[in-house]
Amino acid sequence: MSNRDKLELEYEDEDSGEILERIKEGGRLMSLARRMRDGDFEVGDEMKDDNFVEEIVLCQVLTNSVEVQVNEQRSLGIAIYGPNFSWINHSCSPNACYRFSVSGSELEMNYDESKLRIFASGEETVLKTWVCDESKLNNGICGYGPKIIVRTIKPIKKGEEVCIAYTDLLQPKGTRHSELWSKYRFNCCCWRCSASPPTYLDRVLQENADAHIEESKSSSDDYFYRNEAYKELINCMDDIISEYLSDGNPESCCEKLESMLTRSLQEEQPEEEQSLANFKLHPLHHLSLNAYITLASAYKIHANNLSALHSRTDDPISEVFELSKTSAAYYFLLAGVTHHLFLSESSLIAIAAHFWISAGESLLNLISNPMWNSSLNRQPANLISSSLLCNRWNKCMLMEKLEMDLVFCQSQSKSRLLEFEEISQSFLGCLSKILPPVWTFLIHGHRYFKYIKDPIDFSWLGITKNHNLKESQALQGSTGVGSSYFGRTSCCCRCEVREGIDEQKTSILQLGVHCLLYGGYLTTICYCRDCYLTSYVKNLLCQVDKQGC
């Protein structure tokens, strides 16, 4: 499949023309390299323009290639797979997701290649062009390339089209359409994009933002100033992030991003500071989410840089600890916001899983940091004592069962499948008990977080609680937890609010492990129990246990 013809038809368009020129230049260089390799090169060949095949190949790479990532830290590059994958269409509300597995890993141990459940669909003449046995290409020409695994995340009926996401699902409709058109040359008409009125997810990502505009202005003026303020805010954020990527200064990036976010939430500002950027940005707005992602990472990098510096000096280290707290707070806020949006759109499950795992890891890193005791002027002590772990710090039944399923891989029993909604409600119930003092501790003295009253319950924004996940039947039965453990009218949670510094650390530990286990549970649904991400969670949990009993 190639978009070369579309690019030629749209040559007058500035973007399309630039892309086509780059493809033509790339095709010419590819052809030249091939001829030189084969000894078929003559003087003047470098200017030949008959490179149609090479241009088609480059267009196919642009259209069908995917980035191969086999763990959280490393990308192997890009790859193109046969029609059983590359012909899967896009949807902004997909019913499937994909991941990669290197040869020799869990794929060979757990999957029967003969049981292919999806098939390419199209005109017979087109399908016949793939005359080779595609199964021979699953690992690449050499037989050891990374395999791609497609897994359902919603119910799919026989004959129903399987769809994945080509773009970031946490972006508003306009941004998604722009990216899809730029790379793939199509306009998405999925149910989410066609919904009227827009879905809750798209409304909260974009429409919950109001400019500070004088009441005397007309409605048309309101619309104009709102759009101008929005554009200025986007440009401001792009400039800040571009500068950060260029100069690598996390401190400056954090200061500028938070200044932008804080100004956008202030109800009143000095007249001399008022401008089109005086924009009341909703905390769940997609620009806020983009800022949270950058801030969580930048604070972590800033803390690591200072920690490396302090390891060679005797300077006070309280600043490092405060930076780590703020990073953990942003990671948790990201998880809470994404989870709230996930409850209205189940295709966000993979994103929610990643953010919950990141939140859990950041909390465990915070309390395992040797700087904890120094920053609180206390005598050195092991954070996670044997006594705390041996009595399992009042671990609730939800944690016990999810841990058993994740760590020890209990066999799945259809008679004991638990609805996702029950697990989610139990998880949020635990968090409602543990979180308040921990959140207060994490955000103490921080200028932006004073506007975030609760990072998981957004009723303070006027949003009605809704824990009913659309198409929740797709998320049943991915663990061995039995419904008998979680009655709808009874509470299984034994999590307790703790006071004092030792107890405070234990509460943070509880919160971190809850996040890891829940993120791991979501991962077993969208990726499977034996993928690299669940292994990553298991390793983090094992590190906790090794510090204890």
Image: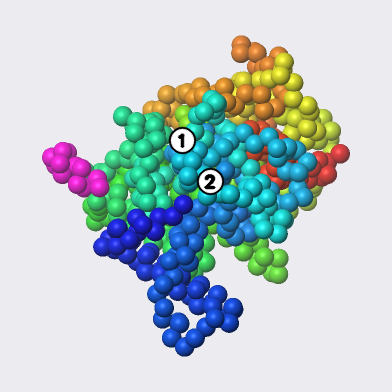
Q: Which residue is mark 2?
A: 128
Examine the structure image and report whether residue 391 is included in the region drawn in magenta: no
Q: Element at badge 2?
A: loop
Q: Element at badge 1?
A: loop
Around disc 1, counting alpha carbons within 10 Å, would you say few (fewer than 14), some (14 to 19), or many (20 or more)? some
Q: Main secondary structure of the magenta part?
A: helix
Of labels 1 and 2, the one closer to you = 2
> Can you name the residue that lies furthest to the top here?
489
Q: Residue at x 68, y 34 (%)?
A: 115
Quarter of the figure with the C terminus: top right
**Residue 304, image x, y percentages:** 63, 60
Q: Residue at x 33, y 53 (%)?
A: 233
Give the vertical position of 236 relative to 198 (above or below): below
In the image, 530 versus 72, the foreground residue is 530
**Residue 209, image x, y percentages:** 32, 40
* Amino acid type, mark 2: Lys
Q: Residue at x 60, y 60 (%)?
A: 77
Give the vertical position of 42 relative to 116 (above or below): below
Q: Quadrant of residue 497?
A: top right
In the image, 235 versus 2, the foreground residue is 2
* Amino acid type, mark 1: Ser
Give the residues in magenta: 215-227
Q: Which mark is residue 93?
A: 1
Mark found first going from the N terminus, 1 or 2? 1
Q: Residue at x 31, y 29 (%)?
A: 197
**Residue 6, image x, y percentages:** 34, 55
Q: CA distance from mark 1 to mark 2?
A: 31 Å
